[in-house]
Structures are given as structure tokens and as C-alpha cells.
Image (spheres, rainbow, N blue to C red):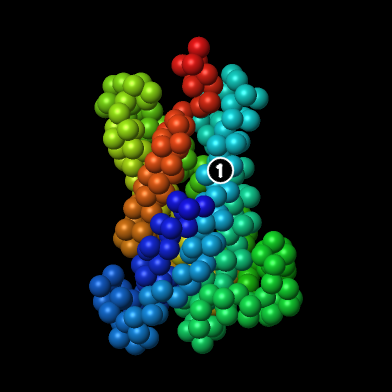
Amino acid sequence: MLAAGATHLAITPLDVLKVNMQVNPVKYNTICSGLSSLVREEGASSLWRGWGGKLFGYGAQGGCKFGLYEFFKKQYSDALVDSNRSTVYFLSSASAQIIADVALCPFESVKVRVQTQPMFAKDFTGGFYRFGDEIFHVITPPVLHINCLQSPTVPIKVHLILNFIFPAVSMIMFSSFEHTVGFLYQKVIQKKKQDCSTAQQLGATCLAGYISGAVGTVVSNPADNIVSSLYNKKAKNIIHAIKSIGLRGLFTRSLPIRITLVGPVVTMQWFFYDTIKIFTGLPPSGGLPRDLEKVDR
């Protein structure tokens, strides 16, 4: 939770710009001009709108995603002894991401509206209470997620995208990370993980994290654009969103800033996560638990 929440909090200004670029690409067409427009029109504080959603929402999501990925990887590795690595990585990441998205959903719903609708609420706390009042007058996050699916305020199509696309992206990102780590140790460093220095281990983690983040960004960009369009009523449905954005726009709109955002964020998450693991006597991320058992023997 610390690794994910802190890194997402740090890039809140870029996230605010990213969401506005998706909603109004004509006005916010570049990173520099977009940031200048936001500061000039709405003040410097506008760059930090929705920071609570970044810190607490993505902290909760990250805690579930990273922690449960390790848990499920152990369970599937033991249960599917004869299966290849990719199968274990895919199943583990998908299982963890589904639970993580449930934790994130209410925070993300409020964050996007606070960032793109200045009149909705002054801050995340006010937005969370207003959002809850609009839906069903109960503010507890677990119930909020369930009722979001039935609320006319937030399109059910948004949550269907989140619940089906994000696990697929997580599968690709975690698998990319795992295979990149394996490649780096085998082909580049040419040492076993346990024989490498701390600097080498963290270096492999950071490089694999950046590559997995970049791959995940490209794959998830169309869904991210559609979600922003539906949230802010720029499109009536998914088909309308695709037509209004265009096939090329789905893959290219806000892609540079998303790569700028996601690559470093994922890298820092893995870096903080593995730093904590190494300095508490645990092995760095990458590989299956049964591989470590072979080393111990």
C-alpha cells in the first residue's frame, strides 16, 4: 500500500492533466500547454485535485494487487506443478487484480469527477460524501462499489470495462515483469538472483518494472480513453465513444503522458516494494516459489 499510494500521489498533477487531455484533447493538447492552462485558469491547487483518491484508492489497490499476487502465485504454483510459468503468472495476476479493482472502484469514481468537474467538489473528501449521497446515502467504500453498478450517476459500462479489461492488463504487466526479470538474470547479468548484489537486484527490478509498465500502458490506453469519455458524458455508450474518439485516437490520445506517468510509477512501485523486501530479509520479486525451494535444498 505504501509503495503504490506514495508513487501515485507524487504524480497527481500529471494524472489531472491526463484525465483532462482525454476529456478535452483540443484544449489540452500537449503536456506543457495543458499544465499552463490548468494553472492559469484554475490555480496551482487544481493540479492536486483528487490527490486523496490517488493516495488511498491506489494504495488500497496496490496493497491488494501486489500482496495478493504473491499469495496467489504461491497457491497456483503449488496446485499447478506441471503448468508453465505464464499460466501461473496469468492466473495469479488476474485473481489479485479483480479484488484490487473492487478496492479501487469508489475512489477512482470520485477522483475522476473531482479532477474534471471543478463544481462537483472542492476536494476528495467532499467529493466522496457527495458521490455517496447521490447514489444511496451510505459512504462505506465496499457498499459504494456494489451500488455504483446500479447507479445512473456512473455508467455500468465503465465498471464492466474496469472489471474485465484491467485484469487482462494486469496479466500482461505481471507476466512481462516476470519474464523480463528472468531474461535479465539469465542473459544480461548471468548470475543467479541470490548471488547478485542488492544494486543488481534492484536494477533488474526497476528495468523490468519500466518495461512492464510501458507494455501495459499501450495495451490499456483504448480502455482508459473510453472510461474517461463515459465518466464525463462525452459519449452515450461504448460504441459512441469509439466513434467520437476514433480508432487511431483510442491508441494515441494521451498515450505520451500515460507512458510518462505509468512507466515511472510502476518502476517506483516495484523499487519501493523490493527494497522493503530485501531489507527485511526476503528475496526480490520475480520467479516462482518452487524455484526458491530448489535453491534452499
In the picture of the structure, the residue carrying the numbered disc 1 is 67
Q: Quadrant of residue 90?
A: top right
Image point 33% across, 63% down: which residue? Answer: 257
Is residue 198 shown to the viewer in this render?
A: yes
Mark 1: which secondary structure? helix
Q: Quadrant of residue 22?
A: bottom left
Q: Is residue 18 left or right of residue 167?
A: left
Q: Nearer the viewer, residue 238 or 102?
A: 102
Vertical position of residue 44 compared to residue 187: above or below: below
Image point 27% across, 26% down: which residue? Answer: 189
Q: Is residue 264 left or right of residue 174?
A: left
Image point 54% across, 83% down: which residue? Answer: 121
Q: What is the x, y in percent for residue 294?
A: 50, 15
Image point 43% across, 42% down: which residue? Answer: 276
Q: What is the x, y in percent for residue 281?
A: 45, 32
Q: What is the x, y in percent for residue 262?
A: 38, 55
Q: Quadrant of residue 233?
A: bottom right
